[in-house]
Image (tube, grey):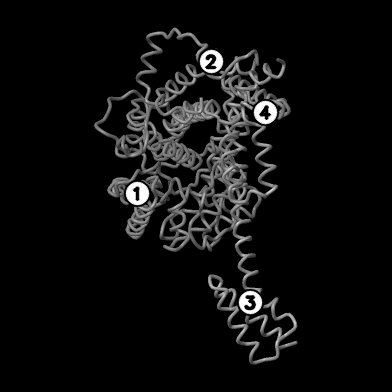
Amino acid sequence: MSALRHIRTQELWLADQQMAAPDGVSEWLRSLWSNVPQPPDAQKLEDAPENLKAYRIYTALRQGLLAVLQQADEEAGTRRFGSAVEILESALRLDGANLVVKNRLEAFEKMLPGSSLGKEPARQALPAELEAGKEYADELQAARMLFHRRQFQEAEQILIQSAAPSDPDVQVLLETVRQARAATQEEQFYKNGREKALELIQEQQFEQAADLLCNLLALFPGDPVLEKDLQYAQEHGQDHPEDAGLAPKNRGGPEPCEPQAEPACQKSPAQLVETKSPLAGGWAVIAAAGLFLLVAGRGGIAARASGHGGNFQESKLISDPLPVSPLFARKLASSSKIVSVGITPEEKLAWRVSQ
Amino acid sequence: MASQSVVQINAPVTRFLSSAARYTLREPTIVIAVVNLKGGCGKSTIAVNLACELASNGDTVLLLDNDSQGTASHWLTSGRLPIRGEFMPLENDQDGERLVRAAAARGERYVVLDAPAHVGAATQAAGKIADLVLIPVTASGVDLVATRAAVELIRQARTIRRSGGPRCLIVPSKIDRRTDAGRQIEAQLLAFGESVGPTIHQRTAFVEAFGAGQWIGDYAPQSSAHYDITSLAIAVKRSLRI
């Protein structure tokens, strides 16, 4: 029995090593029978390499079919049923008797647009799809309203958790909201920072005021108000090297003074990746966002959400050209922000193709 | 007839859904690495306070302490910071990528890495996965030498990455303008050819905030130290927008 087990092991090992030439294994086994007593299932052993080869072929075929089925399912998942059917038809040429492939092919053929049976599954899926579309429309509308009320953070939260976070409309609005939020934060920082600097100057903490003004100027280079404040702080800081707010308070704020050549701490405009005055930044974002909201609000989602035969492509064209004041147009034209708002050219192209 | 009208109404919805499925863009997680190859330059102070400042503006932030010293982790153990954090030394590039994927799956807007003070797998991984690298530099000659090496590391990462990233922002740290070195540091840093951010000044409030287990915005709101961190956060956001 142990001899037989040994022979089986050797046979399987050889079959594994010589799968391309199972005949060699069979010959080796036959020569073995001439030296040792032939076991009762000798013929079965001699056939084993062939069986093993067949099993390996079957396994490889099965793995290949599974991969093809997966690919077809992926195509169907993106509603490209024609492509899925083609893949399955080619799979049937490999294994015409495979019931799984046949059944899947039958199911996908029903989903083809021309099929008389195709409408039935589509109708079954319709409520969920309509619900998803409505949810998306509601979210976008809510986000626009919050944006209009300058509740940027709330609008951003809705858009981030949107049912379709990758939709171009959502992406554009999200980018606009973020830029508006950033512009607001910067304006707030400018306002609060300068107030703090003036407070420090009043407390005669000139060096701390100068530090703060330097950082403000690094973010808003060339701002004449900040430059004057800094000049004042630096001049008086030299007069009061002890600093630290020991001097009496309420001495008065910075006095108007002639601009100096260049404050010691001022950084070049190229120092930060992007520098701009807070007001200019705010204008750019608000102008871009306003235009976006007007265009999208008039035509974008309304037709889509209504469901009265509205088609997305058509809904984009519903809006008439908007009257834009010359001042607004100038601000739009001069704003580099508008260029950066929105989706990338590749995404735009993909979007057009998908239409 | 009824089914035909159903199909007509369904068409735009279907088109929308299929186009949405094609768009695989997800909410991106922005990785900010705070790196320098020398200790004591304020990496953890900047990493923790910057992360908290970003969180205070309503963004979700995850702080990852990749430094075996564990300063940021120690800070986090107080439980008084408005952010989540983990002690996670990076062993290799794969760890870094896995880490960011995990963070993205959780939906954090920002991941702030506090990298160790040496050239190792962690620092190299940080350079490869970060969108922005902050290099804090104090006003000392030793720091300037270490900064040169860190900048070189970033440039190597840029050559490897197809996107051209990471961006880099050198941050003058622990600066005292009453000293000559403090006044000259910005000009010296500009010579590296990278962007230089707002200055983080030498303030006792930072040390005290660490002792209290708080970030500067909670410990001393509207203080000069808080304004330093706020200005850095604004510079960081601007750097990332371009």
- Residue A343's label in the rendered image is none
Q: Are marks 2 and 4 in contact (CB under 8 Å)?
A: no
Report in which chain the residue with disc 1 lies. Answer: B
Q: Are marks 4 and 1 in contact (CB under 8 Å)?
A: no
Q: Give the quarter of the figure containing the N terminus of chain A.
A: bottom right
Mark toward the viewer: 2 or 3: 3
Q: Which residue is mark 2?
A: A314
Q: Which residue is mark 1?
A: B182
Q: Is residue A264 visible?
A: yes
Quote the CA–CA distance across marks 3 and 4: 51 Å
Structural crowding at the residue carrying mark 3, measured as other residues with C-alpha within 10 Å and reported as few (<14), some (14–19) or many (≥20): some
Examine the rendered structure and indicate whether residue B7 appears above or below residue A190: above
Examine the rendered structure and indicate whether residue B59 appears above or below residue A280: below
Q: Which residue is mark 3?
A: A12
Is residue B134 shown left or right of residue B112? left
Q: Position of residue A291 (x, y in %)?
A: 47, 16
Query: Secondary structure under badge 3?
Result: helix
The amino acid beneath tag 2 is Glu
Examine the rendered structure and indicate whether residue A7 appears above or below residue A125: below
Quote the CA–CA distance across marks 4 and 1: 75 Å
Mark toward the viewer: 3 or 1: 3
Mark toward the viewer: 4 or 1: 4
Q: Mark 2 vs mark 4: which is more N-terminal?
A: 4
Q: Mark 2 vs mark 3: which is more N-terminal?
A: 3
Report in which chain the residue with disc 3 lies. Answer: A
Residue pictured at 55% horizontal, 56% vertical: B65
